[in-house]
Image (cartoon, grey):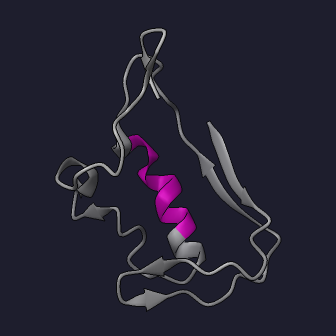
Amino acid sequence: MEASLNGTEGVQLAAPRWLSRPLRLPGLPLGTVVLDAGRTDPHVLRPLFDAAWLGSGFEDGTPSFAGQAWKGDTTPALYEPLVVRGSIW
């Protein structure tokens, strides 16, 4: 999967105690990762998350990971996943 953020000019990313500088680019390419269709693993997406945060000036990359652990494993979900035709959305 290849990902990019478009329409980012002037956008700022926020972490609990930090706010990025406004992006000056109309788009931010995040890179490419290979996804396994039968498995959902947030660690596979980490390079894309890191690219977004590094591109916004956060030198530690994404705050979604604490070390190697994905914070989503310990943070309660804001919503319940929806199952449609056997797939979780």
In the displayed structure, 43 sits above or below 39; it is below
At 47% from the left edge and 63% from the top edge, which residue is drawn?
Answer: 50
Query: Considering depth in this image, is 59 or 19 the residue closer to the camera?
Result: 19
Q: Can you give x and y, in whole percent of width and height, for residue 24 in the image?
A: 77, 83
From the top left corner, tell me how far across and down residue 45 is, in percent.
45, 46
Left or right of 12: which side holds 70? left
In this rendering, the answer to whether 22 lies above or below 45 is: below
Quarter in which the N terminus is drawn:
top right
Number of numbered markers: 0
Along the line of sight, which residue is nearer the eye, 20 or 79? 79
Among all residues in the image, which is located at the extreme top?
A: 85
Q: Does the magenta portion include 76?
A: no
Q: Position of residue 55 (x, y in %)?
A: 60, 74
Dominant SS type (magenta): helix
Magenta stretch: give its range: 44-52
Residue 46 among magenta residues:
yes
Give the quarter of the image for residue 9: bottom right
Depicted 69 relative to depicted 45: above or below: below
Q: How far across and how far down the image is residue 84, in percent? A: 48, 16
Instruction: Name which residue lies at 37% across and 33% down.
Output: 81
Q: Is residue 1 left or right of residue 84?
A: right
| Residue drawn where x is 21% and y is 64% of the image | 67
Report the front residue among 61 and 8: 8
